[in-house]
Image (tube, helix red, strand yellow):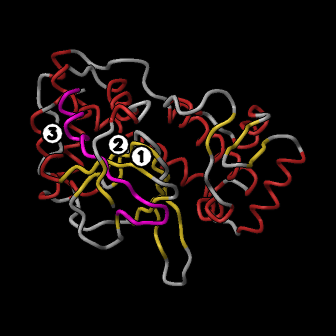
Amino acid sequence: MTRQPSAMSQQSPWTFLHILERLGSLAPDDLRHIEHLAAEDYLVEPRRKIIDDGRRLDHVFIVKSGWLAEFKQLRDGGRQILNFRLPGDMAGIDCIVYETALQSTVALTPCVVARVSRGAFEETQRDYPRVARALLLLTLRYQAILNNWTVNLGRRPAFARIAHLLLELTRRLQIRGLAAGPIVPFPLKQQDIADCTGLTASYVNQILQDMRRRNLVHIGDGTLELRNGAELAAAAGFRSEYIQALPGPIGSAASLSRPQTLSGVRSLNDNRASSLLRRAAERG
């Protein structure tokens, strides 16, 4: 990674801040703290890993621009993509629980990220309870996305798997203000889609050609256009509630006055960590 001059004003929209504001009633001090955490920009070139599976993990990364992919590399050379991290997402949040990475993360496009140390992240959890609660809710949404990917891989047929992926990515970009209408940025190659959906690249090609013939989608020049999203959604059983931002500030001032942090979770056993998360959610 190459450190770049701070350029928050050039990252438009500043989606990470917007997403947290949607998930929690943040005070001016909270917003200033987030801006401080993300003040230093790092440029990541395509195909460069920022997290390596099994290696020590000491930072959380905030994606300001570009696309990252989280994946597991198998011994036979196969790759399973676990998620895409888009502008406004975090990568490496595992470091608050685990000292080594559980998967790799690679840049698919030129990316700009902010790097937050484990210590700074834990300090945020301890000293800024509103931010801590918004981060907890954000990780719950990540889990909802993972749950839907599990269903996609385990139970949906090939056409529905790809349709669901295209619909999800489109909606994730739209709700961040990164696309207007049915045309969205789409840097994925057919092999990337195959590695998400557990299919071969040649089979993905056949399905995408079928979608084009039926005038459902158009992919080209780094963009994706959904031409008949309703038919795709019906085929995939797609409902976007699991990726929608909540409609406004959540919770009362009283519920936010008590610390709701994840600090120290990595020093607890799994049962105690689960209990901490459950109690934080119940207090909300």
Q: Report the side of 264 relative to 183 (left or right).
A: left
Which disc, if any, is residue 53? none
Q: Disc 3 residue type? A: Thr
Q: Report the side of 16 relative to 79 (left or right).
A: left
Report which residue position mark 2 lands on. 139
Q: Residue at x 23, y 26 (%)?
A: 31
User: What's the magenta region?
Assistant: 31-50
Q: CA distance from mark 3 to mark 1?
A: 21 Å
In primary-sequence order, the first of circles 3 and 1 is 3
Which disc, if any, is residue 143? 1
Q: Is residue 48 above or below residue 24?
A: below
Report which residue position mark 3 lands on. 124
Q: Residue at x 28, y 32 (%)?
A: 134
Q: Is residue 134 above or below residue 278?
A: above
Q: CA distance from mark 1 to mark 2?
A: 6 Å
Q: Disc 1 residue type? A: Gln
Question: Is residue 76 a member of the stretch shown in magenta?
Answer: no
Mark 3, other Cα within 10 Å: few <14 / some 14–19 / many ≥20 = many
Q: Residue at x 81, y 40 (%)?
A: 216
